[in-house]
Image (spheres, rainbow, N blue to C red):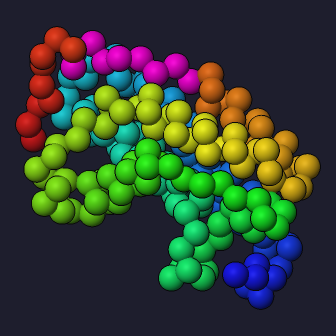
Amino acid sequence: MNKESYFTEKELNNIFEDGFIYELNMVVFTLIRFMHYLNKPYRTIEEKQEQDVFLESFLIHTRVIIDFFRFNKNYPNNVYYTYYVGKGSVINLVDTEEELFRDLSTKLAHITRGRLQDNIKWWDRLEEIKNCILWLLKQFEKIIADSERKKLLSEKIKEIEIIEIKEKSFINSGATWPRY
């Protein structure tokens, strides 16, 4: 696909800063906020719902980031990483990223039988998810053409790297989430 036939360089720059970097900012913010709630015992249903909002927001923004690295010709209005790298530069998603994207798509973003049956404990996969995002971003950093975009990307990578994933103490104790 020829990016020039869809987007101007100015549009691509705006999309990178206002779209891609925004998504990374949201990944960082929502993961930090969720980690804040993770070891904080909640006392009300509202506090539990706030915790869930940050987790689900983190997961949805993660899905958007992974999708940025999965070219799909059925969505010609989407912008993909390939629009920002030199010709022939490719990031091949491995099974881990594809499986995570599939889980996020079918077990989070849609109400499906699998979502209800599998009852994924997303908090148990936070380290895996963080590592997946970092791997994709570091591959992108190696091949991104524009130095200003590369600088922005490098800053976001550093922000994600320093987020410490902590285990939730009550999960390991066998306690369960309250029912609504």
- Tell me, yes or no, if residue 128 can be seen here: yes
- Tell me, yes or no, if residue 40 can be seen here: no
Q: Position of residue 151 (x, y in %)?
A: 85, 42
- Relative vertical location of residue 147 with respect to residue 129 in this rendering, above or below: below
Judge from the rendering whether residue 127 lies leftward or rightward of residue 113; answer left or right: right
Q: Position of residue 158 (x, y in %)?
A: 71, 29
Span colored in magenta: 163-171
Q: Quadrant of the C terminus?
A: top left
Q: Position of residue 60 (x, y in %)?
A: 43, 53
Q: Nearer the viewer, residue 40 or 155?
A: 155
Q: Nearer the viewer, residue 177 or 114?
A: 114
Residue 7 is one of the magenta-drawn residues: no
* Figure quadrant of residue 68: bottom right
- Relative vertical location of residue 73 with respect to residue 13 in this rendering, above or below: below
The number of numbered discs placed on residues in the rendered structure image is 0
Judge from the rendering whether residue 115 lies leftward or rightward of residue 146; answer left or right: left
* Dominant secondary structure, magenta: loop
Judge from the rendering whether residue 176 lies leftward or rightward of residue 143; answer left or right: left
* Figure quadrant of residue 138: top right
Q: Residue furthest bottom?
A: 5
Which residue appears at 77% of the width and 38% of the height? Answer: 154
- Relative vertical location of residue 17 with respect to residue 100 in this rendering, above or below: below
Judge from the rendering whether residue 143 lies leftward or rightward of residue 37; answer left or right: right
Q: Quadrant of the N terminus?
A: bottom right
Which residue appears at 62% of the width and 22% of the height? Answer: 162
Which residue appears at 28% of the width and 60% of the height? Answer: 106
Q: Nearer the viewer, residue 177 or 90?
A: 90
Residue 167 is one of the magenta-drawn residues: yes
Q: Position of residue 45 (x, y in %)?
A: 19, 34
Which residue appears at 61% of the width and 80% of the height? Answer: 77
